[in-house]
Amino acid sequence: MAQKRTDDFLRELLTKAANDSVNVLLRDPEKYRVQIIYTEINRDKHNKPSFKNHYFNHDPNLYFNPASTVKLPLAFMALEKLNTLRKKGIDKHTPVVFDSSQVGQTSLYTDASSATGLPSIAHFIKRALLISENDPYNRLYQFVGQQEVNRNLHRKGYKDSRIVRQFMGFTTEQNRHSNPVRFLNEDGSTRYSQPALYNTDSIDFSEVIKLGKAHYDSRDTLVHAPFDFTLHNKLPLEDLQQLLQSVMFPASVPKKQRFNLTEDDYDFLYRYLSQYPSETPYPKYDTTLFYDSYVKFFFRDNTHRMPEHVRVFNKVGWSYGFLTDVSYVADFENQVEYMLTATVYVNSDDVLNDGKYDYDTLGYPFLYHLGQIIYQHELKRERKFKPNLSAFQVQYEKRDKQDTRPVLSEVDN
């Protein structure tokens, strides 16, 4: 069994900062299920990076609900699968539609938030990354299929990870099924058809995972028993960190861990892992609700602004009282880079599914101040060689100030 791991260096760095929002939770890591991985990145004279992970209360067996962080590997896998269809003239921008073949499945033929009015894998990934929309994740899951999602994770060495649920309230059996998918020609005819998929592989649900003292069930009835996460998605924190590192720094991981992506795929991912809603014309999000730091938890304070010279390439998740962020941070002005990955559980009444969590009072302040402690440490940390970060300087989109289309304010995320 894996042991809990805490580095004296990281514990001292965090506690010495004497920040109440951080220390209150660090003093009781079991209650708050805190886990942190701070990844120090150092470059050699050829700009080749090396990575050193520092841990606080890291425990692969300490379950947290990954929530929307599962959208990260789904985006990678969808692009990887598309690259097997290139000979059929299909890419991430090819219009794609979804039929239904099972009870509960929903079809999809249009997407009013896209420039063309049609869905595409590229637009699903944008929506999943920019503000963490849920239906795009479901569509990526349906395209890749539950079987390939989990075989892919295991092939790449993520043996303890599983992604087995869409965000649709489906049963375990329903989640094994995926909708029929069709890619379209310009005239609307079908270019390529993918039949409905079904996962025949067995899934290991032997580990029983129950949390809390009570929960509300699907009928909104209070049940005085723990909430059962046994059949839910699972993505241990170090797996999450490695997934992001494998795309930000593919040469730094073993070949079997890399995703089969093109240069254009990497550019695309770097853009939408770090672009802000205010920069994005399609979808045209309401930026009073979806502000620049909305999904940048380590920089999310009440100003809602991001430092001009910093970009955060990341994915967050929030659900059932869990808040999680996996990030690569690049400060182009100060030539600073690092990774920071953390999860925390803030649910003081110990009742799950009641919609009452301590995100605003405990969770967000903890992650923000944690992020700032690490960022300030990195600004001061001496480096033998300053990094050349040009690979991550992305050409971002711009929203037209003359665009009078209504903003999008009601989304499921």
Image (tube, grey):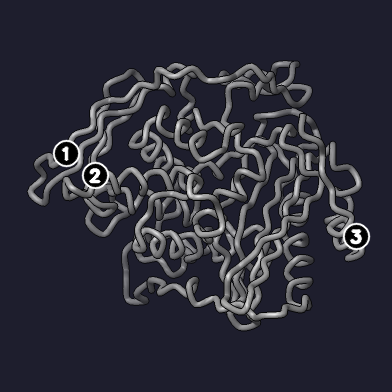
Q: Earlier in the sequence, mark 3 or mark 1?
A: 3
Point out residue 174 in the picture as x, y percentages from the top left corner: 42, 19
Disc 1, SS? strand
Give the alpha-carbon distance from disc 2 to disc 3, as whole Å.
50 Å
Task: Answer whether labels 2 and 3 touch (C-beta < 8 Å).
Answer: no
Residue under the point 16% across and 39% down: 192
Q: Nearer the viewer, mark 2 or mark 1?
A: 2
Residue in view at x 12 percent, y 47 percent: 185
Which amino acid type corresponds to the residue marked 2 in the rendered image?
Leu
User: How far is the residue under mark 3 from the one under mark 1?
Assistant: 56 Å
Mark drawn on residue 85 = 2
In the picture, the disc for residue 12 is 3
Q: Quadrant of the N terminus?
A: top right
The residue labelled by disc 1 is 192
Asked if 65 appears above or below 413 in the picture, the reply is above
Instruction: Indicate which disc, 2 or 1, sits on the residue closer to the N terminus.
Output: 2
Q: Earlier in the sequence, mark 2 or mark 3?
A: 3
Q: Residue at x 26, y 59 (%)?
A: 115
Report the Cα–Cα distance between label 2 and label 1: 9 Å
**Image location of residue 410, percent across then percent down:** 45, 49
- Discs 2, 1 touching: Cβ within 8 Å: yes
- Compared across the picture, whether 10 is left or right of 122 comes to right
